[in-house]
Amino acid sequence: MHTKTVSIFGLGYIGLPTAAILADAGCQVIGVDINPVAVDTINRGEIHIVEPELAAVVARNVAEGRLRATVTPEPAEAFLITVPTPFEADHQPDLSYVKNATLAIASQLKAGDLVILESTSPVGATEQVAAWIAELRPELHVPGHSDQPNIAIAYCPERVLPGKVMAELVSNDRVVGGITPECSVQASQLYQLFLQGQCVTTNARTAEMCKLTENSFRDVNIAFANELSLLCHSLDIDVWELIRLANHHPRVNILQPGPGVGGHCIAVDPWFIVSQSPELARLIRTAREVNDSKPFWVLDQVKKAVADCLMANGKKAVDIRIACFGLAFKPDIDDLRESPAMQVAELICDWHQGETLLVEPHIHQLPNKFIDKASLVGIDEAFERADILVLLTDHKVFKALSRSQLTADFVIDTRGAWGN
C-alpha cells in the first residue's frame, strides 16, 4: 500500500510523533489540531511538547514539505484520530473529542479512504465512529452498515513509553482491529509503511479491550506496590528494601510504589472497563481506588511533618515552607496529565498556610491552577528556603542528589530515590 496523504487529528504526545514518523516514511502528512499555537509552532518546524528525537524529525519533514499542520480538516486517503479520551466526574468515558474529530473527518471522506481510531477508548467506540460516519454520510458504504463497504474503519492503540516514543512507535508490535477483516488488512498496510514490529490483526472490540487490559494489568500491579508501602509504613519497614529482597524470588517481580498513578493511560483506562461492567470488574475497581487514594495518604505525611516541624522549630505554620520536587507523572518528561505529583502539590497548596515551592525542571511555567498558590523554583533555591522537602517524581537530576545534600530536617520521599 502506498498512501500519499495521511491526516492526523490531534497533535499531542502521540499524534505529533506519529505524524513525524509517517512523514519520514514518505507520506504527505496533514496534522489537524484545534490549538492554533501548536499548529503555528509545528509549521515553523518546531515542537510544543518534550520528547527526545522528535524535534529533529519534525524540523526535517516540515522543511522538506512532507509535514504541515492546520486547524481546518482537509481531504486525505487515511485519517488517524489521536485526540484525548478523558473520563467525566463519575468516571464515565468522555468521547466528545473523538466525536468532534469523527464529524470533521466525515465531511472529507470519499470512497476508498481509511479511518483509524488510536485514542484509548471503551469497548464499542470504533463501532460508534462508524455509526457517526454512516449517519452523517449516508451515501458512503460504511463497514458494519453496508454489505459492500467502500471505506475502511479500524482501531489501533499506541503502546509507547513517554521519553521513548520515537523508537517504540517503530519497534513495538501493534494490535489492529478492524470493523471487518478487510479493514484490519487495510489499516495494517498503513502501519507497515514504518513499523518494524509485528502487526497483529483482530476485530475492533478485542483491540479496544486489549489496550484497556494492558493498562489495567499494570494498574493492578502498581496498586499492590502502593498498598504494600502503606502496610510497611505502619510496621516501620523500608518498603524499597522489602521489595528488593522479595524480587530475588525467581517468580516475583513487584513494581515500585509512588505517590499514586498518573498519565493519560494507566490512570484512566481501567475506569473504562469498570464503567461498562461495574459488577464484574471488582479487582480493577479496587486497584483504581487504592492508587487514587495514595495522594491523600502523602498529604497526611506532609501534615505530620509540618506538625513535627512546628514542635521542633517553634515556627508558626505560615512561616513553614514546603518544597515539592517533580510535577510530571513519570521521570524526565514534561507530561503533567493525570499526574499524582500534580495532585499532591495542589492538595498541599490548598491546605498549607505557608509558602509552597515547586521544583519541575522540565517546564517553564506553572499550570494556571497554581497561580497565587505556589512558586516555580530551582533546586538550589528550594534547598535554601524550604523546611520540608517532598520528592514526588524521580527525575534523574533529583536522583543524583544524595541524602547528605538535603539541607532540610524533614524529608518525605515517595519514590525511594534519596535513601534513608
Image: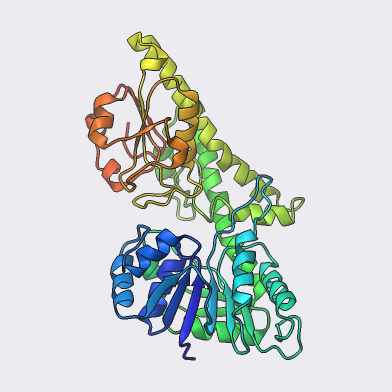
Question: Which image quadrant: the C terminus?
Answer: top left
Q: Is residue 185 left or right of residue 319?
A: right
Q: Is residue 117 left or right of residue 229?
A: right
Residue at 70% from the left image edge and 80% from the top image edge: 137
Q: Is residue 233 visible?
A: no
Place of residue 96 in the rendered image (x, y in percent of width and height, measured from the top left): 64, 59
Say how many tags the image has: 0
Q: Position of residue 396 (x, y in %)?
A: 29, 47
Quadrant for residue 239, please give it: top left
Q: Is residue 337 above or below residue 144?
A: above
Relative image position of residue 261 (x, y in whole percent):
51, 46
Q: Residue at x 40, y 16 (%)?
A: 318
Q: Is residue 23 visible?
A: yes
Left or right for 50, reference 138: left
Q: Residue 40 in the image: state x and y as whole percent.
A: 38, 64
Q: Is residue 402 above or below residue 207?
A: above
Q: Which colouring convention does the figure follow?
A: rainbow
Please name the residue shown 40% across and 68% down the image. Answer: 17
Q: Kindly give the residue lying farthest to the top in the view shown.
A: 314
